[in-house]
Amino acid sequence: LVRQVLPPPPGARPPLPTVAVEIAFFLDPQQAASYAALLQGQGIPVRLVGRLDDAGRSWTYIRSPAFTDSVVALAYAAHLERTLGIIATLVTEPAQPREGS
């Protein structure tokens, strides 16, 4: 089976890379959900992301909404550290299609 890869149509824009602020991660999804609820109660928007590691363990990551600008994401991470003492890291995520493409 041969798969032909076609170029994007004229005027199409490539997907945007995204960056998120990773706040915490847990092996226990209930602990992750509890901490996420605590953060949300403090007005911090978060989402839970599940991933398997190489050993097959399921981790639940607590992350900010995605940013398309890493400078803005870094500023948000600094804000979390300054205001709440949360030391977070930036992580790249799969590219998302651009609106209007």
Image: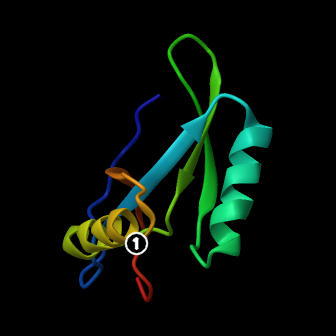
The structure residue drawn at horizontal position 51% and vertical position 45%, both measured from the top left corner, is 24
Whole-percent x, y for residue 79 in the image:
34, 73
Task: Inspect the image, locate mark 1, and give the three-letter code of the amino acid beneath it.
Answer: Thr
Which residue is farthest left?
71
Closer to the camera in the image, 68 or 65? 65
Which residue is farthest bottom?
100
Q: Secondary structure at mark 1?
A: helix
The structure residue drawn at horizontal position 69% and vertical position 44%, both measured from the top left corner, is 32
Q: Is residue 59 above or below residue 86?
A: above
Q: Is residue 21 something that shows in the picture?
A: yes
The structure residue drawn at horizontal position 58% and vertical position 73%, both measured from the top left corner, is 45
Q: Is residue 31 above or below residue 45?
A: above
Whole-percent x, y for residue 55 in the image:
56, 10
Whole-percent x, y for residue 6 in the image:
31, 57
Which residue is farthest top?
55
Q: How many marks?
A: 1
Q: Is residue 54 left or right of residue 72?
A: right
The residue identified by callout 1 is 83
Q: Is residue 83 above or below residue 90?
A: below
Whole-percent x, y for residue 31 in the image:
74, 40
The quadrant holding residue 9 is: bottom left
For the C terminus, the quadrant is bottom left
The structure residue drawn at horizontal position 43% and vertical position 89%, both measured from the top left corner, is 100
Q: Is residue 74 above or below residue 54?
A: below
